[in-house]
Image (cartoon, helix red, strand yellow):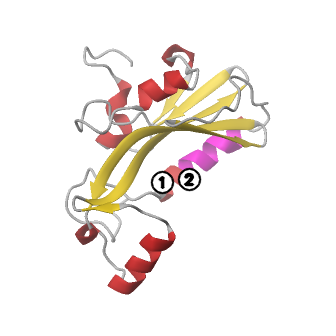
Amino acid sequence: MFGRPAYLSGDATRFPRFSPLRAAACAALLAVAAPAAAAGAPLRQVPGYYHQVLGELRVTALFDGVVPLTRQELQGVDDAAEDALLRRQYVPETPAGLQTAVNAYLVRAPGHAVLVDTGTADCFGDGLGQVLANLRAAGIAPGDIGTVLLTHAHPDHMCGLLDVEGRMA
């Protein structure tokens, strides 16, 4: 039913910044949680997480790390348009590829916290696996999360669900 986006090829563990499925899941989550008032830690911004208040909700982006995405994995866009888009979006590029951020999101309402995706944990090695530490840095204990919503079952979205002993992280 849901195939791989036409602009990707190669390794199934690499994804673009925008996912229509993730956007739809977040929109549905926001719709059911709407009447609550955002509460919790102050809106202090530091590297590793970013708070955004949306009406009555507080959404916190939790940085997991970066993974390179090669230009060969982008399809359906001519080279000139690709260059312009990447330049306009300030996407850093190294010899390894385009810097692609992996993030999870925490949606908080009074009395309830929902974690959208759990990050990579140790599934991808160095440079990733920072969601749990950034969650704690944002003032949230893992036990304070009431619901975990996985947008889809790829390792960069769900490896952080369990610790190395197989217990809830």
User: Which residue corresponds to mark 2?
Assistant: 24
Residue type of the residue flagged with mark 1: Leu
Q: Nearer the viewer, residue 91 or 75?
A: 91
Give the residue type that dot 2 points to. Ala
Residue labelled with disc 1: 21
6 sits to left or right of 144? left
**Residue 3 seen by the camera:** no
Secondary structure beneath dot 2 equals helix
Q: Nearer the viewer, residue 54 or 139?
A: 139
Q: Do the residues labelled 2 and 1 touch (CB within 8 Å)?
A: yes
Q: Which mark is on residue 33?
A: none
Label 2 crowd bin: few (<14), some (14–19), many (20+), radius 10 Å: few
Q: Nearer the viewer, residue 67 or 112?
A: 67
* 100 sits to left or right of 57: left
Residue found 31% across the figure and 19% down from its top: 163
Q: Is 74 within the magenta?
A: no
Tell me if residue 73 can be seen: yes
Q: Where is residue 132 in the image (x, y as percent from the top left)?
A: 43, 25
Q: Reply above or below: 52 against 14.
A: above
Residue 25 belongs to magenta span: yes
Q: In the figure, residue 51 lies in which quadrant?
A: top right
Dot 1: element: helix
**Residue at horizontal 69%, vertical 32%?**
43
Task: Quadrant for residue 75, please give it.
Answer: bottom left
| Residue in the image at 57% along x and 35% along y | 46
The magenta stretch is: 24-32
Image height of 140 relative to 7, above or below: above
Q: Quadrant of the N terminus?
A: bottom left
How many numbered circles are shown? 2
When the figure is inspected, residue 83 is found, relative to residue 127, above or below; the finding is below
From the viewer's perspective, is 120 left or right of 109? left
